Image (tube, helix red, strand yellow):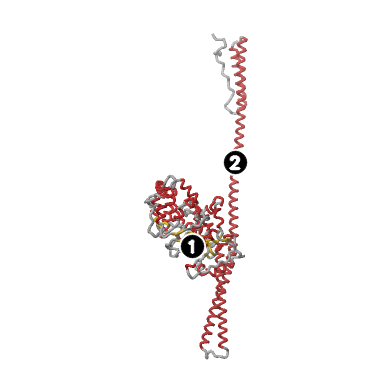
Amino acid sequence: MFALQSELRSRLRWAVIRAIYDGLPNFQVCRLEGMGFGPFLRLEELAPDVALIQALKERWYPECHAFLFPWGHMVPTLEDVVRITGLRVDGQAVTGTTYTSYQEPVERLLGLAVRGERSSLVRQTVLQASLGVASARCQTGEGLVEYMDWMTEDARAAMAEEEGDAADRDLRRFLTLVIGKLILGTRGDPVGCRCLPLLEDLSSVGNYAWGAALLAHLFDSLGTSSRETGVAGFFPLLQVWAYYHLPSLGRGVARRRGVVQWTPYIGEDDATQPWVERGRPYFGRDIWLHYFNTVVPLHHRLVARTLGLHQAVVEFSTRQRAWEWPGRSFRGIQQVTDWTVRVREQLDDWERRGKEVVSEATSDEDYFRAYARRYGAQVYKGTRRPLDPEGRISSLEGVLHSTIQQRDDLQAVVNQLRAKLDRAQQMVGGASSSREDPGRSMLEGQLASAVTWAEDALAQLQEREWELRDALARTTTLEAEMAEWREAAKEATRWRQEAAEAAQWRQEAEEAARLCTEAGDLRTQLGEERHRCDMLRSEMKGLERALALVGRSRSAASRSGIPSGSAGHYLTGSFGRRRNEEEARRQERAPEGSETGPRVMAPPSPCPPEGTGESG
């Protein structure tokens, strides 16, 4: 039930802010882009993975501000923040003066009323209503698209369309909502207003490291009681960070809406992400993070392996008094406090860009040994199976180092007990009878029993050590074999792809051959047609010459006085002879037994042709 409620609240918050952002005039969108909020506000909605977030919270260790895993420390860094969220992590620290009441700046800069005289909170519903979204409840049967559309239209209608004081007030209200509910989120309806003094001069808002403040607030939220479910900070950073750095969890799959929209910031070229280039001087450094009264350290040296270095041993001393613990958050309603003065040393560290992480370690063995000694009881208890091959080996190494440390400690105890037993036996002496001093005899018996118990425990630990060494060796060998098999599988996959490509090429070659054959046949048919056309053209020329000859004959006859009928008789006789010759040739080609025989030419017509001059 809690997971469902949390997801609904998160989706509603995203939907409202995105709808208002879509309803902003273009000049306001350009101003947000110039402040560095554009990439962050363009991110798509991400449904919360409540179980994952709660499991990570249980792994958080406030003493070192890092997660504890069987294979060592893990911690989100400023580089993770800038690559996942697109927020700026360089520039001025988000700090200044906190007040007991924010009534005056809220009324002056936002035109709203503060909830309570001694409060830094304003109601979210009031802030949304001032931006045109009076009600963020989705009606029954209403789709998400329609729901977003009407909220966007209401927000657009409520916004000032031209630059001026009203537009500045709208932008401050929107930034207060974004910063107070997303970047530095709070639980429930209220929205924090501590950052409002920084929004008075809108031209300087883009100079602050809002991404670093987000990480500080997230660290502080993770340090709350484990009985509090969820985190008040920006959970998508933690969620996507786990998807990217712990892929074997298998939780960042495509079915979870938003993952595919978030991960491109991680894989894109740095040249396309100017916010990454600006933040690079802050990467790979130990540095203090600031958000007004929240001042926490980022111990990047705990994850020096991410920088290509061997991990050195890092010790954190536990102080008896909690208020002496560096990096704690100053909770509760404070008096008017200037944090640029109260945490001047930590602020100077930020302005110096912290301290570069270096390591002189030549291996990780000492780190694993110290890590197992320091955190073994709470990390390895209940560990079933690490998440990935590297994690399995690292986990076994950690358990082995922890067992070796326990064996060494127990060996020291055994040696001490043996020494005490020897002294007790010497004190009893060979001459004195145990009956004369029963107390010493009892002490000797207890020491002997303790030595026997310790030696049995030591033997069990030694046996456990050898089992772990054997398991580590077998796991390492198995992982090496699995790596070879994975390479072989990749090679086989490549071969299959090449075979499929070869088969496709073969099909394409066969198709090309078929097309070539068809093209040859078409060329042959085209040649035949051309030959037939040439023959027809020759016959047409012959006919044209014959017609021309007839025309000349008629002309000559008319000039010589020969009657036109004689020319007609000549042409008729010529045509008859030609027809008789063709008929003879056809008879010669006719097969035997054919019904076709010599045809008898019909007698000439008794009527002489017209124009011969014999009529009348």
Residue 489 on image: x %, y % = 58, 57
Q: Quadrant of residue 367?
A: bottom right
Could you tell whether 372 is left or right of 47 in the image? right
The quarter of the displayed image where residue 333 is located: bottom left
Q: Does any portion of residue 184 appear in the rendered image?
A: yes
- Nearest to the observer: residue 464 or residue 572: 464
- How far across and how far down the image is residue 545, in percent? 62, 20
Label whose residue precedes the other's in the sequence (2 or 1): 1
- Total marks drawn? 2
Mark 2 vs mark 1: give the one in front: 1
How many other residues sit within 10 Å of disc 2, few (<14), some (14-19) or many (≥20)? few
Q: Tell me what residue is drawn at x 59 percent, y 68 percent.
A: 366
Task: Give the labeled residue for mark 1.
Answer: 342
Amino acid type, residue under disc 1 in the picture: Arg
Quadrant assignment for the C terminus: top right
Residue 571, horizontal then vertical, whole percent:
60, 16
Identify residue type, mark 2: Arg
Q: State whether residue 149 appears in this view.
A: no
Local crowd size for mark 1, using a 10 Å CA cut-off: few (<14), some (14–19), many (≥20) = few
Q: Residue furthest top?
A: 616
Q: Point out residue 120 in the picture as x, y percentages from the top left corner.
A: 41, 58
Q: Is residue 417 above or below residue 434?
A: above
Give the residue pinned by disc 2: 514
**Along the viewing direction, whichever of 136 and 3 lies nearer the viewer:** 136
Q: Quadrant of the N terminus?
A: bottom left
| Left or right for 581, reference 165 | right
Element at badge 2?
Answer: helix
User: Is 121 on the left or on the right of 563, as rendered?
Assistant: left
> How much space separates mark 2 and mark 1, taking CA atoms?
85 Å
